[in-house]
Image: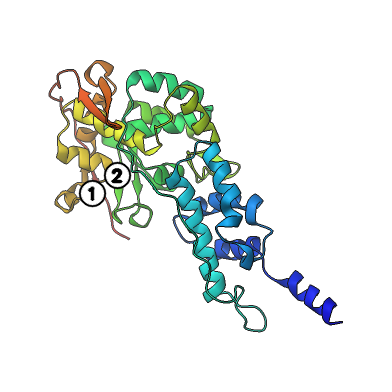
Amino acid sequence: MEHVEATLQRAARPRFADAATRYLEESQHLRSADVTAWHIRLLTPYIGALELNRIHDQTLERFIADRRAEGVTAATINRSLEVVRTILNRAARSYRDAHGQPWLGGLPPLISTLPESRRAPYPITWDEQDRLFPKLPPRLARMALFAVNTGLRESNLCGLQWPWELHVPEVARSVFVIPPEAFKSKRPHVVILNDVAWSIIQAQRGQHPIWVFPYRDTHVATMNNTAWQRARRDVGLGRVRIHDLRHTFACRLRAVGVSMEDREVLLGHANHSMAGHYASADVGRLLNKANLILNREETRTVVRVANDAPHVWIKGPARAPQHNKRAHLTLVSP
């Protein structure tokens, strides 16, 4: 009888999948919920069926080895390991069973992370863009093209919503106003759509009532998927990250002579001296500047690698932008 009782108790012990499910349910309000779910989907085949007290560095070795074999960076692997850390901490300190006992007895194990080597920005050239983007699936290619024409961070691009769209009659075009709670700097950000970005928005209309870039009735969780990793590897651009598309936008703006002040507005940098641009964005003027990067002759870049750090030289003279009609957008705080 004691043996049967002990067996039943072991069978009733929560497993990693149970704790992960509870953590996801409690994290739905967080901006990072979809990314966390993506990491958990990666981890589940390896540790999902394990009892919480059996999860430690050794049980994660196969997961780490497989991810490394796929060419995933140490930083991305560490984000998955941080999710494991968080869930184990919750299981030990917060989650309780019907008898008031913690799901994980004692202190959670120390999950070791991999050493990271911070990579320098790698803005891609037009030639590299022409080689990389056609290798991507159509949905991902559209998102990548949108990124190099708006400078949006991956999380904001994946989570872009139609309710954030605001029509500006003076320029016969819309902008997207990302609310403070969804933007890194905790300030509203006005996304200016140049001609290419606008054509992508028009093509996405009607696909989903909420998400601009939908996938299976929700939005894309991450652009850094196996298709992206395979495509960049096939064209010899294994070091290019999703965030480098944002660097590319910034680099091309600088190449055509857009001032640092306007670049910060277009990129949404947290610069308190530019608060007025968020309250009343000069949409027409900024639209003209964002369209300047479409001139390939003025935004050529040459990337040289020295001591594993890329250096970028900008070619081509920067012409002074021509200002046409201006449109003022007023944002009303909630």
Q: Is residue 127 above or below residue 195?
A: above
Evaluate whether residue 159 shows in this view. no
Query: Identity of the amino acid at label 1?
Result: Tyr
Q: Of residues 268 and 287, which is closer to you in this image?
A: 268
Q: Of residues 220 and 21, which is closer to you in this image?
A: 21
Q: Of residues 241 and 252, which is closer to you in this image?
A: 241
Residue position for label 1: 278
Query: Identity of the amino acid at label 2?
Result: Val
Which residue is painted at 80% across and 73% down in the image? 7
Q: Secondary structure at mark 1?
A: helix
Q: Earlier in the sequence, mark 2 or mark 1?
A: 2
**Please, which residue is most extreme toward the front here?**
58
Evaluate whether residue 19 shows in this view. yes
Residue position for label 2: 190
Marker disc for residue 233: none
Label 2, label 1: how far apart the Cα atoms are: 7 Å
Query: Where's the C terminus, which quadrant?
Result: bottom left
Along the horizontal axis of the image, is 255 left or right of 179?
left
Q: Of residues 32 and 272, which is closer to you in this image?
A: 32
